[in-house]
Amino acid sequence: MSMEETNFEATHEFFDMWVKTYEATFGKVSEVPAIGPLREKSEKISKGFPLFFSLYSTWMDTVADFQNISMEAMKRMNTKKINLEDKTGTESYKELYNAWMESYSETFKEFMRSGHFSSDMGRFTSNFLDVQKYNREMLEENYLKPSNLPTKSDIDELNKELYSLKKQVKELSGRINELSGNK
Amino acid sequence: MYELSSIEKEYNKLMSGFQIFLKMPEVSVDTTPHEIVYTEDKMKLLHFLPTVEKPHPVPILMVYALVNRYYILDLQPDKSVVKKLLDDGFDVYIIDWGYPSGLDRYLTLNDYVNGYLNNVVDIVRKRSGLDKITLMGICQGGTFSVMYSALHPEKVKNLITLVAPINFDTQKGLLHVWAKNLDVDKVVDYYGIVPGDFLNAGFLLTDPFRLMIDKYVGMFDRIDCKPNDEACLIRNEEIVRNFLRMEKWIFDSPDQAGEAFRQFMKDCYQRNLLIQNKMELNGKKINLKNITMPLLNIMAEFDHLVPNEASIPLNDAVSSKEKEMVVFPTGHIGIFVGSKSQKEVCPRISKWLTPRSGLDEEGIPDIKIKTSKRKSKKELHEG
């Protein structure tokens, strides 16, 4: 198979088909209303499925993009004229390394400058944080709360309270200093 | 035979590099003698001990960014912006913002600019016995200094900005491009305190192959000595030490106070409000036209983090009559630690600032100084 003919369109196509099939079949399960004594818990658990799916989906997009760009970098390296004549031993390896570094570095930088990469990374970060948040909520729900341990929101609440108290103290100290003519 | 000997040579080079790494003691940074003159929460104000008998009356307050640490300005004696300015007769202060923890997640930009920075300016004014001081802001610290100078122009005599972003609407810097698509609310709401590693990953992605591979290959490549060449071995040790100092600084990335990060990213990077005079701190609009003091705006031509387009519009946005713009052929970090820094950047700052720092041509103060708390060089060095 020649490199010119290689691309990841087929990967994309296959993955798109997989996504559509999932959404039409198993994906629907998470939308089914929960019933029974464990209704609340199972509803929370089923809310996680679409989040995991979205993350997986954006991750696959990112992987395919990076595969494409690696292939492009390899093509560019192939077009470089690397002169290995008169070079022996490690010098020729160095020549190859320099050509590899230049091709890959420039191609990746070009890709990362694109709006496509920027929006993909934004989407990936966003989906990643959704999953992290969900995991944390489940951990708090299932382990911390039953063990009577403080959750992230408990700690945030305390931090907020401390922040406002410290701010108030600073303001009052400033006013006292002003009134006593120290400032 | 020749090939084998060249492979052996490269192997020996690699091994000697490893040997230097193995016996390398902890590298030192931030070596210029200083005293801590003020602390507030995690923030500290450092005052560097003067190296001349009579420093210029108007002190310099350096404001570094919240990302990464201030000691890039005092990395090692021969690569220290601080030391060079001290030797040129300036009285230098610098803010160490510290490492925010969960307790600081609700700190806002207003707390940094109108709180910490304003308090520090007041301390420096009081110590120098002057109403106005020189503010030198670097990178994000430059943005803060511009905000501060617009809000409190009566306290700033001179403003110097180094590689400071003011206009965020540019496609030249990768961070500017990426920031537009970042869901800042989600990041802050999840982390609270935004991890320094999260931001560092972004910086590394600006040039991943060079920053994560080639830099290290290059370091080992520079180690090349003939056996028993003592002078060369010492030189190699210095190469490794300098490299490790930079590594230490690059990966010494404090976490970011969430609310301050949220406003900085949204108002500056995403909405570009500062240059349009639409940004607000504590309900008060920041009008750059209020900046009337002399301005020196310094940029690096090959800056990959703060492109020149992000800094140039500042000069047109202010009302200052005396304003200069200088571009040096170096990078964002090179401007502090590169070869141009000591030879060109610092001398340029000194040349511009000396006539504006309160001594006339004969070295006599040309400004009125109130009772100063400043100690003499002898008193300071005796502790």
Image: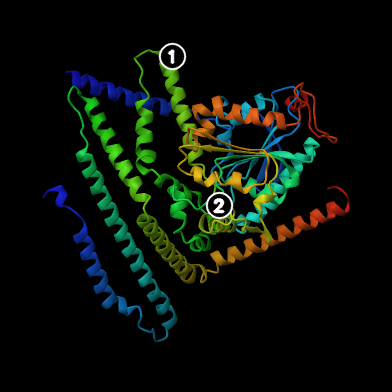
Task: Report the residue marked by disc 1.
Answer: B231
Residue B194, given in percent of the width and then of the height, sits at 52, 55
Vertical arrangement, residue A59 with respect to residue B291, above or below: below
Q: Nearer the viewer, residue B119 or B295?
A: B295
Q: How many discs appear? A: 2
Q: Which mark is residue B256?
A: 2
Residue B89, given in percent of the width and then of the height, sits at 69, 25
Q: Nearer the viewer, residue B173 or B50?
A: B173
- The chain ID associated with circle 2 is B
Query: Disc 1 and disc 2: Cα gap in Å?
Result: 44 Å
Q: Which residue type carries mark 2? A: Gln
Left or right of residue A96, residue A50 in this image: right
Q: Nearer the viewer, residue A151 or A48?
A: A48
Identify which residue is drawn at 37% across, 12% down: B228
Residue projecting furthest to the left? A1
Kind of element beneath mark 2 = strand
Of the two numbered discs 1 and 2 on the same chain, state the one appearing first in sequence.
Answer: 1
Q: Which residue type carries mark 1? A: Ala
- The answer to whether residue B317 shows anywhere in this view is yes
